[in-house]
Amino acid sequence: MAQAAFEELVEDFEFLDDWEDRYRMVIEEGKAMDPLDPALKVPATKVDGCASQVWLHAVTEDGQLTFDGESDAMIVNGLIAVLRKLYNGLPLAEVRAVDAAAEMGRLGLNDHLSAQRSNGLRAMIDRIRSVSQG
């Protein structure tokens, strides 16, 4: 179900035994993203329920979802990058079918995020899923 880019990330994570190495890799994924256009950091794109500042800007074109985002927290920026690999390019009809918790679990992230970060991750996933509904 996951996108090819996410599958590649899963394969990369399989070589990392240590949670700290995985954590660093998530942060590096976030650093590799282009920053969100400051004009898109508006209340409509801000994600509530996150401990840090998070903005997600989604676009639907030709029945497919793509989104960009940014956070003021490095690990959250990395989680946005991971979610982009999971969701970007999916047909809108498939977005809600993604079991994001299970997919993130394949990366070993579920057990190592604080409760606040887990809540924020759920809030980002909920936002992405709501966009797919139109």
Image (spheres, rainbow, N blue to C red):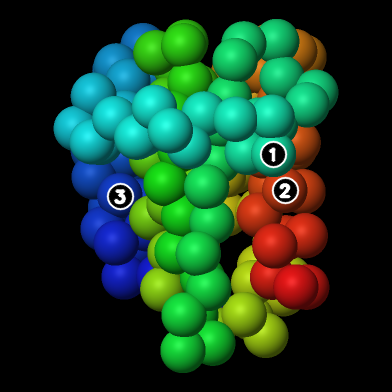
Type of amino acid under label 2? Arg
| Residue at the spot 38% in from the left edge and 40% down from the top edge | 81
Q: As drawn, which residue projects farthest toward the front?
A: 39
Give yes or no for contact between labels 1 and 3 (Cβ–Cβ under 8 Å): no
Left or right for 37, reference 63: left
| Residue at the spot 46% in from the left edge and 89% down from the top edge | 62
Residue 44, label in figure: 1
Residue 91: which quarter of the image? bottom right
Give 103 or 48, whichever is nearer the viewer.
Answer: 48
Quadrant (top left, top right, bottom left, bottom right) of the C terminus:
bottom right
Type of amino acid under label 3? Leu
Question: Which residue is the site of mark 2?
Answer: 127
Query: How far, Cα to Cα, is label 2 from label 1?
Result: 11 Å
> Residue 34 in the image: x percent, y percent?
23, 36
Q: Is residue 38 above or below residue 81?
A: above
Q: Is residue 91 above or below residue 116?
A: below
The answer to whether residue 109 is seen in the rendering is no
Query: How far, Cα to Cα, is label 1 from label 3?
Result: 30 Å
> Residue 89 in the image: x percent, y percent?
41, 73
**SS for callout 1:** loop
Sooner in the amino-acid sequence: mark 2 or mark 1: 1
| Residue at the spot 30% in from the left edge and 49% down from the top edge | 9
Badge 1: how crowded within 10 Å, few (<14), some, or many (20+)?
Answer: few
Type of amino acid under label 1? Ala
Sooner in the amino-acid sequence: mark 3 or mark 2: 3
Question: Which residue is the site of mark 3?
Answer: 9
| Residue at the spot 46% in from the left edge and 55% down from the top edge | 67
Give yes or no for contact between labels 3 and 2 (Cβ–Cβ under 8 Å): no
**SS for callout 2:** helix
